[in-house]
Structure formats: C-alpha cells, structure tokens
Image (tube, rainbow, N blue to C red):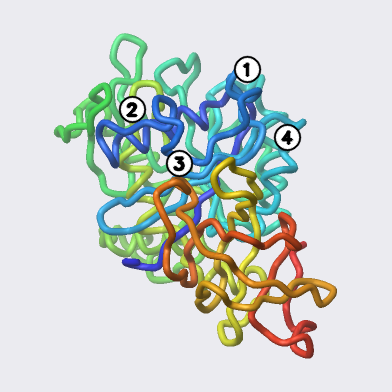
Amino acid sequence: MVGQPRCIALVGPSQSGKSLLLDALIRRCEPGQSSIANESRSVQPEANGRAYAISIEPTLTALRFLGDDFTLVDCPGSVEFAQSGKAVLDVCDMAVVVCEPDERRLPAVQVVLHGLEERGVPHLLFVNKIDTATQGLRETLAALQSVSRIPLLLRQIPIWRDGTAAGFIDLALERAFIYRDQAPSTRMDLPDGELPREKEDRFTLLERLADHDDILMEQLITDAEPARDRVMADLARELRTGQAVSMLIGSAQRGNGLLRLLKALRHEAPRIDGTRARIGLPDDGPAVAQVILTRHSAFGGKISVCRVLRGSFREGDAVLAGQGTTTRIGGFLAADRPQSGKIPSVDAGETCGFTRLESIATGQRFSTQTLEEQDSLPTPK
C-alpha cells in the first residue's frame, strides 16, 4: 500500500462521541458511506452494544485519505469494556483522545490520558462538541492540562458568533475557516476583532515549541517570523516523541474540524518503524504480528485481526507464538470487510484478518521465526 499503512486508536470516555466521529470521518473520506447505516462497513460490536448505543469491543474501519491508508479503531470508552482495547493500544501508531468541553468529564479523561502516557502511546486531543461549549477554550485547555502529565498545545481557537463556534483559526498556519455542516470548512480572512487573541495564542504555541527547538527560540527572541514548514515539523516531532499533545477542536455531529484532524493524522502520525522503536522490536528479523481482536463469523469461523509489525506474511506460512505453539495461516481478509474476499499477502503496517490461528489469542504476538529465536520476540506490556 501507499505510504505505509497506519493504525490509529480512537479513545475517550463513554458518550464522548468516538463512534460518531468515526462515522463522520468515513463519510468525509468516502461520501455516501457510513459505518452506522451499513454494518458491513466495519468490524462492528456485538448486537447488545448497538442496542445500548455503546461500544463493547473495538470497531475497525479502513480509510484512505489523500493516498494514505489508515485503520481507525474505535475503542470502548465504558470502563467495563475498556480492557478489550488494550491489545490495540499496544501496537497502534498513535491515539486520538475524543473528549468534551465539560469539566464534569475530567476524571474519565484523566484515566484515558494516564493510560496512554504509561504506555508511551503518542496522542492528540480532539475536543468534540465544540458547538455546545459553555465556557471559553482557554478554560477548557486549563482544565484538560490539569489531568495531563504532558504539556498541551492549543492548535486552534474558535470564532464565536452569537455564542456558537462558527469557525476556527489555525494558529500554526495563521488561517481562518468558517464551518459548514457536513462539508469542508471554507477559508476566510482573519477577522480583525480576533487578531489580538490570535497573536497571543500563536505566540504561546510557538514559545512551547521553542523549548525543544533552539532555532525557533532565536527567531522568537529576534521577532523573526518562523517558517510555517518549521512550525508544522516541530508539531509532528513533539507528538511522535511524546513531548507535547496537540489539541484540536470540532463537532462530529455537524462534521466540523474533520479535515484538519485527517491532515494531522496524515502528516504527524508515526509510521510502523516508529511504533517498532516504541515497543522495542528491532527493524530486522522474521515477520512479526500481534492479534488485536478476535472475531467469530458465520461465514469464516475464527478471524484474528492482527497488526503486522515487521516483515510480510503469506498464506500457508508456519508461525510460532508463545510457549512454542505453532500453526499455519489459512489466509487473509480485510479487517473491515471480511466478506469481500481473500487478500494474497500482508506487509508491515497493515491491519487485517488472519484465518485459522486457532491456538493464538488476542494480545499474543507471533512470528515466522524458529523456536530457538523465540526469546528475541518482545512481549506486550
């Protein structure tokens, strides 16, 4: 596939709007499609979860945006089912934390953030339901910072009209946009009344980036205007290294803020080599994958949805899991559309369904290596 496929986890408290955001992203990338209207579009939760409008196990959807391939995984937000997303977080490239501008939800957000911090998973914040916010974004930023151990970077500020967020200003690009329901935002001139606020918040953003960029610090001291490419590169580096967490805003219900989020994933999300480094898996060696979800379908039996961490797998390959367990791969299916037919092979970065891995459970890693090499295969935390 083009540009190394990436795996992105959507996490956050229950009812924060993760599933609605996933559906909005599907419709933005593939107009006319919907995971809610068409259950075959993604690996859906069990019927009981749908009946109560909650996710009880991870939901996977494959998307292509501007030539890059992504697997988005909606992880359960309810504490009763959060454990089912652990295997996803072990090997995803980054996470999007979906939260609300509501201080009453802070304890639940704190649990999510601390879990990602302890695993070292790069992440950004998407403040959903910005159209229903009852307090200023600076207050929301301060509240969220109180539950994050990593500095937060405010990337956008809303343009308010009649008490409602009608658009936003991108502080890194110094561009203003007006929201359109279920459509990309349209660019506009920076409103005169917003310039003082934009300048202040942009300087705060650049000042925090300069903590790890001496050239940017020198430019700020001398009042030189930093190049936009440098600012964007610094934002990507801060996310990948876990030095800062970007904060974006939008509304999944209205389809606002989606394009900026997709562009952030495309340009800033780590690739599979960065994920291997994070989990301590060397770049060289036999093919390795991890089971992130196990499903049982009426038409295909057991399907082990796996993330390929290194190398390539082919149908019929003999693989080895823990304690010397060996088996052969039956075949490969699309993770989000298993009924669409077999895939001939899978490569590093891809997420797909493996068949006939009867002896390998969710969370386990397996490889094409020999039993003597098994000790070199890192185990998930």
Point out the tag, 4 or 3, that comes first from the N-terminus.
4
Q: Nearer the viewer, residue 281 or 323?
A: 323
- Mark 3 to mark 2: distance in Å? 20 Å
Residue type pointed to by label 1: Tyr
Q: Residue at x 60, y 17 (%)?
A: 51
Point out the tag, 1 or 4, that comes first from the N-terminus.
1
* Neighbours of disc 2 within 10 Å: few (<14), some (14-19), many (20+): many
* Neighbours of disc 4 within 10 Å: few (<14), some (14-19), many (20+): some
Point out the tag, 3 or 1, that comes first from the N-terminus.
1
Q: In this view, does 236 lie above or below 107?
A: below
Residue 302, given in percent of the width and then of the height, sits at: 64, 51
Point out the tag, 1 or 2, that comes first from the N-terminus.
1
Write down the residue under mark 1: 52
Say whether residue 159 is left or right of residue 58. left
Q: What element carries label 1?
A: loop
- Mark 1 to mark 4: distance in Å? 13 Å
Q: From the viewer's perspective, is the residue at label 3 or at label 2 nearer? A: 2
Quadrant hosting residue 214: bottom left
Q: Do the residues labelled 3 and 1 touch (CB within 8 Å)?
A: no
* Numbered badge on residue 255: 2
